[in-house]
Amino acid sequence: MPHQQGIKTIAQNRKAFHDYFVEEKIECGIALFGTEVKSIRQGRINLKESWAQIRKGEIWVEGMHISPYEQGNIFNKDPMRSRKLLLHRGEIRKLEGQVIRQGYTLIPLEMYLLNGRVKVLLGLCKGKQLHDKRDSMAKKDSEREIQRALRQRQK
């Protein structure tokens, strides 16, 4: 069976956009086992409480929950295990410098299939304060009201 072409979004971390300012987005691969890929293709993944950290020149994602594959029996892995993200060494060094010096955090924003391969969209994020969250919510509400008024006017 040939792989599907294009991008198919599997999971998004909407909470990250509420809690953080996303400064930069980086696409990276992820090291997975076969049963994990099958479970991901079924959409059985949760990115909500996940984050990434740099250890010994490698980036590892923590807190990502991939449910065990139902037909996987002994080949299933721990759903909460650390998983390695695949990036070039230069990209990792650049991110490491920003995380250490400037206080950024690495957050997985989205997981998707790109031409049959699982990819993770990693965000370089800075935390929001409570007043920032209120401002962004007020801005969204006002935009929603404007769109609603425009739709009503067009009718």
Image (tube, rainbow, N blue to C red):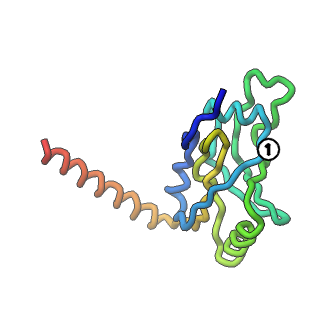
The vertical placement of 15 against 125, above or below, is above
The vertical placement of 106 against 144, above or below, is below
Q: Is residue 137 left or right of residue 48?
A: left
Residue 55 place in picture, x, y as percent: 82, 63
Image point (19%, 50%), residue name: 149
Image point (73%, 49%), residue name: 30
Please state which of residues 104 and 32 is positioned toward the viewer in this rendering: 32
The vertical placement of 154 against 2, above or below, is below
Name the residue at the bottom extreme: 101
Q: Is residue 80 left or right of residue 44?
A: right
What kind of element bears circle 1?
loop
Q: Could you tell me the amino acid type at mark 1?
A: Arg
Name the residue at the front extreme: 2
Name the residue at the top extreme: 71
Image point (55%, 55%), residue name: 16
The residue that disc 1 covers is: 81
Quadrant holding the N terminus: top right
Quadrant holding the C terminus: top left
Image point (85%, 65%), residue name: 56
Count of number-bearing discs: 1
